[in-house]
Amino acid sequence: MANRHSAKGVSISIPSIAIISSKHSSPGYVSLLILLILTILSGVGMEGYLKANAESRMVRRDSQSRQAQYLSEGGIEWAKAQLLVDSGLRQGSLSLVTGRVVIVIESSGGGYKVISEGHSGLAVRKIEEIIQLDAGKWVLKSYQELHT
C-alpha cells in the first residue's frame, strides 16, 4: 500500500515500510549487553586503580623509610661534630624538611654510645653507634640498627 501526496500537480508515491521484528534485536537484550559490557569495564578500571594506589603507597613508605634511615645517619654525624666542640653533650634534636632526628649520647668506656632516631612520615629508623676519639678522628667500635 502506498501513500500519495501531490503538490502543484506533481504526484509522489511513498511505499510503506514494514518493520521486521526479531527476538534477538529487541531493546531489552541490547540494554542487557551494554550493561554487562559497562560492568566488566568498570571492574577492570577499578582493579587498575587499586593496583596503582597500592603501588603508590608502597613507594611512599619505602621512600619515607629511606629518608628516616638517612636522617638517623645524619644525626650520628651531627653528634660526632658536636662532641668535638662540647664533650659534655648528652642529647640533641634536629628538625629538617624531610623529618626530624632525636639524638641521645651516653659515655661508654672512654668513648660514646650515640643513639640516633630518624622520623620521616610514619617511618622510624634507629641507629646505635659506639665511637671513640683517637688522634682527632672518630673510630667506629660498633654499629647497630635498632628495631623498635
Image (cartoon, helix red, strand yellow):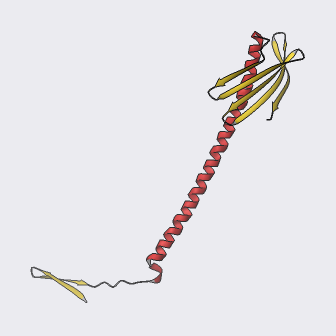
In this rendering, the count of numbered labels is: 0
Task: Between residue 117 and residue 29, name the one nearer to us.
Answer: 117
Q: Is residue 39 above or below residue 113?
A: below
Q: Which residue lies furthest to the right in this view?
A: 109
Q: Residue 53 in the image: state x and y as whole percent.
A: 61, 48
Q: Is residue 51 above or below residue 116?
A: below
Please give the name of the residue rendered at 70% of the width and 27% of the height, measured from the top-left corner. Answer: 71
Q: Residue 91 in the image: state x and y as whole percent.
A: 76, 19
Q: In this view, does 72 lie above or below 20?
A: above
Please give the name of the residue rendered at 67% of the width and 44% of the height, measured from the top-left corner. Answer: 58
Q: Residue furthest left?
A: 8
- Image check: 78 left or right of 141? left
Task: Between residue 41 and residue 61, name the one nearer to us.
Answer: 61
- Image check: 81 left or right of 4? right
Quadrant of the snapshot with the N terminus: bottom left
Q: Residue 129 in the image: state x and y as whole percent.
A: 82, 24
- Image check: 47 left or right of 91? left
Q: Residue 122 in the image: state x and y as whole percent.
A: 68, 37
Please give the name of the residue rendered at 68% of the width and 22% of the height, measured from the top-left corner. Answer: 94
Q: Residue furthest bottom?
A: 1
Quadrant of the snapshot with the C terminus: top right
- Image check: 34 left or right of 90? left
Please give the name of the residue rendered at 59% of the width and 54% of the height, measured from the top-left corner. Answer: 48
Residue 81, quarter of picture:
top right
Residue 102, quarter of picture:
top right
